[in-house]
């Protein structure tokens, strides 16, 4: 059992869920932009071929975003997403500049560390994972 579930103060668990949901929506948006060109991105080369590295990233972001949105398999999905963000940062952004503000990788770094936090903390009170752990009456 996670400490916030035992606490009389339910706000940490609720805010963890809010963080997960907002992050998942933004992550999902990046995935659907890569796969379906919706919403339209600033880069005209999208959508990507699914068999490419960017296509695989789009699939991870789309499917992972959906699973994280509902808080289903939060820890393993967040671990995969954090890895994908680390690869994206070092493959795409880092060669441009060592500083995230100079290479456009601010959001990638934030996604990576939020996902690492979700690996440790779980999905929060408002997640499928939490509903599956609750005892049935």
Image (cartoon, rainbow, N blue to C red):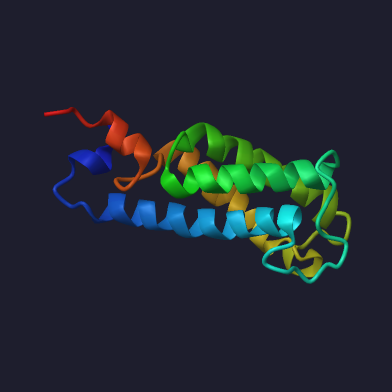
Q: Position of residue 32 (x, y in %)?
A: 67, 56
Choose top left, top right, bottom left or bottom right for residue 97. Answer: bottom right
Of the pair 118 and 132, the residue shown nearer to us: 132
Q: Is residue 59 left or right of residue 2?
A: right
x, y percentage for residue 99? 77, 63
Q: Residue at x 44, y 55 (%)?
A: 21
Number of labelled discs?
0
Please identify the residue farthest to the left as the structure is shown: 137
Q: Name the residue nearer the viewer: 38 or 115.
A: 38
In the image, is 40 to the left or to the right of 75? right
Tell me the residue at 83%/67% (across/down).
Answer: 43
Q: Position of residue 90 (x, y in %)?
A: 80, 48
Report the side of 32 relative to 74 (left or right).
right
x and y percent of residue 4 in the render?
Answer: 26, 43
Residue 135, placed above or below residue 26: above
Frontmost residue, 127 versus 39: 39
Query: Residue at horizontal 34%, vertical 57%?
Result: 15
Q: Quadrant of residue 100?
A: bottom right
Q: Nearer the viewer, residue 89 or 39?
A: 39
Q: Quadrant of the C terminus?
A: top left
Give the side of residue 37 with respect to residue 52, left or right: left
């Amino acid at each position: 059992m996670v400490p916030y579930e035992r606490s009389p103060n339910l706000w940490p668990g609720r805010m963890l869920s809010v963080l997960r949901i907002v992050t998942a929506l933004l992550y999902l948006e990046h995935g659907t932009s890569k796969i379906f060109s919706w919403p339209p991105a600033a880069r005209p080369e999208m959508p990507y071929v699914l068999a490419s590295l960017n296509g695989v990233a789009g699939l991870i972001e789309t499917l992972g975003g959906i699973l994280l949105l509902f808080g289903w398999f939060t820890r393993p999905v967040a671990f995969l997403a954090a890895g994908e963000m680390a690869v994206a940062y070092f493959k795409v952004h880092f060669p441009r500049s060592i500083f995230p503000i100079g290479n456009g990788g601010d959001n990638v770094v934030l996604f990576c560390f939020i996902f690492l936090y979700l690996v440790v903390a779980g999905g929060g009170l408002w997640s499928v994972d939490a509903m599956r752990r609750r005892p049935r009456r």
